[in-house]
Image (tube, coloured by chain):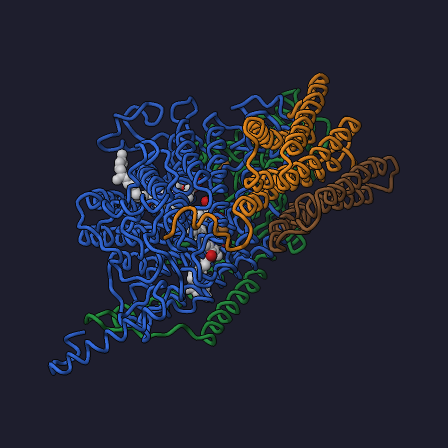
Amino acid sequence: MSTLAATHSRFTTGINHGKLGMWVFLASEIMFFSGFFGAFIVLRNLNLDVFTAGAHQLDKVVATINTAVLITSSLTMALSHLALERGHQEKFRLFLFITILCAFGFLGIKSYEYAAKFSHDIYPWTNTFFATYFTMTGFHALHVIGGLIPMIWMLGKSMVKGYPVEMHHRVEALGLYWHFVDLVWIFLFPTLYLIF
Amino acid sequence: MDAALHTDQHLHGNGHAHRESFLRHYVFSTDHKMIAKQFMFTAIFFLFVGGAFALFIRWQLAYPGEPIPLIGTLLPSTWVNADGAVTAEWYTQLLTMHGSIMIFAVIIPLLVGTFGNFAIPLMIGADDMAFPFLNMVSFWLFPLAGVIMMAGFFMEGGMAASGWTAYPPLSAIASPGQTLWIVALFLIGFSSILGAVNYITTVLNMRAPGMKLFDMPMTVWAVFVTAIIITIGTPVLASALAMLFMDNFLHTSFFLPENLVVATRDMSRTAGGGQPLLWQHLFWFYSHPAVYIMILPGMGVVSDVLSTFARKPLYGYKAMVFALAAIALLGILVWGHHMFQSGMNPLLGTTFMVSTMVIAVPSAIKTFNWLGTMWRGKMEFTVPMLNAVAFVSMFVIGGLSGIFMASTPVDVFIHDTYFIVGHIHYVLFGGSLFAIFAGLHYWFPKMSGRMFSDRLGKWHFWITFVTFNGTFFPMHILGVGGMMRRIYDPTVYDFLKPLQPMNEFITINAIILGFAQILLVYNFIHSWYRGRPAKRNPWRANTLEWVAPSPPPHGNFDMPIHVYRGPYEYSSPASVQDYLPQTVSPDELAEQRARHEQRLARQNENSRPVETAL
Amino acid sequence: MASGLSFEEIQKSYLKVFFALLVLTALTVAVTTVHFGDTANIVVGVVIALLKAGLVAYIFMHLKFDNRKLRYFITVPMFFFVTLVFTLTMLGL
Amino acid sequence: MLDWLPENVSVFGEGVDHLFSLIYYISVAIFILVNAIYIAFILRYRRKRKGERAHYYHGNNLLEFSWTALPFALFLFLAFYSDGVWEDIKYTEKTPNPDLVVEVMGQTYLWHFRYPGSDGIFGRRDVQFMSTTNPFGIDPGDPNGKDDYTSINTMNIPVNKTVLVHLSSMDVIHSFFLPNMRVKQDAVPGQWVDVWFNSIKTGKYEIACAELCGSGHYLMRAVLNVLPQAEFDHWVDEQYGNALAALHASTAPASSATTAVTPAASTTGETNQ
Ligand code: HEA
Ligand code: HEA
Ligand code: CUA
Ligand SMILES: [Cu+2]
């Protein structure tokens, strides 16, 4: 008798659907940002001076802080999954909460950065450097938001009636995504702020 | 889903898991079969839209500036001039939307969306996709995108009008319709990525017990490989689109060099410093693989159909699989062959020519293996078979014309001429679309639980086949004559005037071809309700979907599935009939044989000649 | 994943990675103050970024413990990314 | 089918057409081969009686190998053979040194042609000066530019001379297509590409735009007059005269370019403004 239960608990690879699917998705995400990085390199070689000047207008300090914030969130994300996997509900909740805080912190700092640029009327159309800068960081920020939503949902769920331990795979999948967002930033940070 | 639900599905085995509300079942369904049907009907609808556009294009090309018969004067004044002839502006929009719709809203949804969704779970013995909800989302993004793409109709400036390739600066300085086009494509891309994630996970994780990767039918292999191409290629298009959107909407200049002299738009905000060719590289990095996205599933379906109706094992199964893989890998390394004349460094022209030539080899392998499959077969020319057979020879023509263009010096002359248009349609219509016809007829009994009308099917095939060649073969000659693509009125040029009779010939065929498609739709709709009920396995095929009831209930199979052998054991001496389903266990087989022996023995007593009994 | 270990042990390893990441971040920033010349700076920046990425992928994303096949999901796209960038930059389009 | 090719009057056109026909015959051969076998099978291997069985056979590696290797060899041959011609046409280092250099600028929907004056030197260009009145962005300050003259939608060249074209565009991408010369090259804004050709026959030929550049794309037609050297020289002097006349007449040099244009353009009667 083949039933949904039957095949849906069938993991031929030994990796559960959530994790496997997430990895496939992440593979495509890598290619998505590849497009931007490709464009960045080409445009940089075409307008080196513009890019150098632009990069020097960016706020390294803030960006460094933001990097730290994001790394922290990555850590707590990993820990929260670990906690849930081991059945420590309240730890899970705590770490997830910190992760969400960090995510908001990151977005806050980013919007501060944007605001600063706008106030010096620097906009995406100012020059090619800022076009790439706003596009890349913008899409990265969108990814952060995309991660926040399920996190908040999970937190809410676990507050109401505790998050089911056997569903820790979902948290793991989300974690994978979150670490990837962190990874992207790890590359964006030197590319946009440092190497010039 | 529990035993109870299953059993009463048998009572009314019309496959509708009845407990669901209309909305859950027909609209926001998460059942892979329903989603496949949704993809199918939406895409066929778009086939007619895109086709109608093509017919307008054809009319203008054959009779430049003459009013469109019958409906000409009824059309809005933004499309046609006072006496009802296509205007240059609308023509450009028509060809853009024709290409975009046919590729993104017809072929890909039919091959990947429909066949992928319908065939994969059934053919690997799973009862649904790994992520049914994701599956639903990926469908609903598609009509949404379709609507957005067409919405340009109602805006001033009309729809997108820079070709389906949307080369900037033209596309970057274009009307709002172009912006919508960009958004729509982004959504469609996202939809196919979600689909790809689903397919890959399902194929890797949910195969029935006993089914090794190399027990999978070619269709599954093909869609699986296609899904991999999508995961690699489509995101790059997405990022390119994102940048084009910025250029088009926020006046950035990723693709815009300094100080363009443009009247149609205020460029004061645009800083410049961009590189138009960058778009072409990113676009083709996706869109060449995309053309293989549009053929591989077709190749898979055709391989299955050929083997089934030749009653013969697929020739060189492993070679076929490796050929698929090779096409996928190389396919991502040849994008430059669309840019030979683009002003890119000619050295790249050389390298991309070599890689392009090389990638034709796996296609050659497949072609010859199809021939091998038919060799000493016992072919039954049912409708699916006819279409599959047509696919092979039409694809060969399309592929061979590809070789002309792959040769850079020849491409100097035929680039952006109707030779290309001929190539496009031989591979996309003669290839993909015939494969789609084959697949749709092949699985129609399983989808609907009824048989289609064989007579209508054959009429549709023959008319389509003949007028198809009548429409698109002469295009090669137009191309040799030097007729450029995307031109509104060829008679402007003296050297094109002699070609005009051929344009008229093409158009007449195109119109017949177009209306012939109504036969297909009529046949399907009529048979869906009136056709005679289909048995579980009307084609006497081996693969798993034919073990399930027609149409399969929610959850697909009413018996435990275990796979004992590959999908192509036709005419195997081991079996009693001329086919041997993947699910028949060795002991079961032994039993069948025993019974068969007994029957033969009895017949010999009655001293009747064996043949007649067989 | 490494379920053999206790919560505390794994937590410890995570924390180690975390501090390593912080140090590396500090390092990249510090390095930019000294100027080795354009390409050299780029190389350094990228190398450190790769190191950090490796740590995250390897520990946080469990590649170290998981089925090795999962590594394809990073290596394969990387290959195509490199070909793309290489073609784009090699001959200036 | 190849009879439909427009007459070839270019020196390297030979090579292109030859390659074209070579591939044509190869493909026709292959097509006939494949389809002959194919049709034979279709006729021969039908299912006539019920219960008949096909030949139970899974494939043969030697065959697989051979029909992988053969096309592969053929394709490599084609690639390398093609590359020779390709290099002659497009590689800059293989371009013969030109007798005449012309700058061509695409604008929706017309072609601008610019000739160096009697001094044979082009005046400086700069994107900053680019405008509808000054399509090439000629620097008014540069004396070399004074005697340069431009024309719209007519290109005059001497026969049997190597002509080098500096090609670019001032708005969107166009494509400089000379069917009879077997020349096609996209004109990309912000980027100058070189194209060369050498006409072996005098006459009036057409120049087309082969890249979608807007709804007027089909109108972007120019005329190529391949003249005997004498006639060409005469035309040059005439243009030169016009240019100077215009120069003395008007004070603003920028506009001199365009005033010089009008006679040339009107001779063709083919302007699409
Ligand atoms: C289903 C889609 C599909 C497929 C499968 C192909 C397959 C191929 N295509 Fe095509 N192509 C398109 C869709 C497709 N194409 C589209 C839509 C465009 C236009 C885009 C636009 O709008 O600009 C295009 C454009 C296009 C160009 C750009 C032309 C130009 O703009 O100047 C080129 C150039 O190389 C090319 C080449 C090829 C080649 C070499 C193959 C090969 O894969 C073909 C291989 C197959 C065979 C060769 C036949 C079978 C083999 C044998 C019978 C063996 C024996 C044969 C020999 C030994 C020769 N295609
Ligand atoms: C799978 C893809 C596919 C399919 C199936 C088709 C089908 C057809 N295509 Fe097209 N075509 C493309 C993909 C496709 N095309 C692409 C990618 C381009 C390039 C676009 C670009 O340059 O950007 C192109 C370009 C293209 C051109 C070149 C336009 C130009 O460059 O100026 C032409 C011209 O003849 C053409 C014709 C046709 C015709 C006659 C059909 C026929 O097969 C259509 C058959 C008709 C139907 C299936 C539906 C019939 C409709 C009815 C019966 C309703 C009738 C009602 C009314 C008329 C109101 N196509
Ligand atoms: Cu200019 Cu088309
Ligand atoms: Cu291609």
Residue B238 relative to residue B291: left or right: right
Residue B268 relative to residue D61: left or right: right
User: Residue at image x 41%, y 27%?
Assistant: B152
Asked if one can make out residue D181 in the rendered structure from this viewpoint, the answer is no
Quadrant position of the C terminus of chain A in the picture? top right
Q: Chain D is drawn in which colour?
A: green
Is D47 in front, or is B3? B3
Is D226 in front, or is D136? D136
Residue D254 pos. (x, y %): 64, 25
User: Residue at image x 54%, y 35%?
Assistant: B241
Residue B111's place in the image compared with B589, above or below, is above
Residue D255 pos. (x, y %): 61, 24
Q: The brown chain is which one?
A: C
Residue B221's place in the image compared with D74, above or below, is above
Residue B143 relative to residue B553: left or right: right
Is B295 in front, or is A146? A146
Q: Chain A is drawn in which colour?
A: orange
Residue A63 pos. (x, y %): 75, 29
User: Residue at image x 32%, y 25%?
Assistant: B81
Is B224 in front, or is B580? B580
Q: Colour of chain B?
A: blue
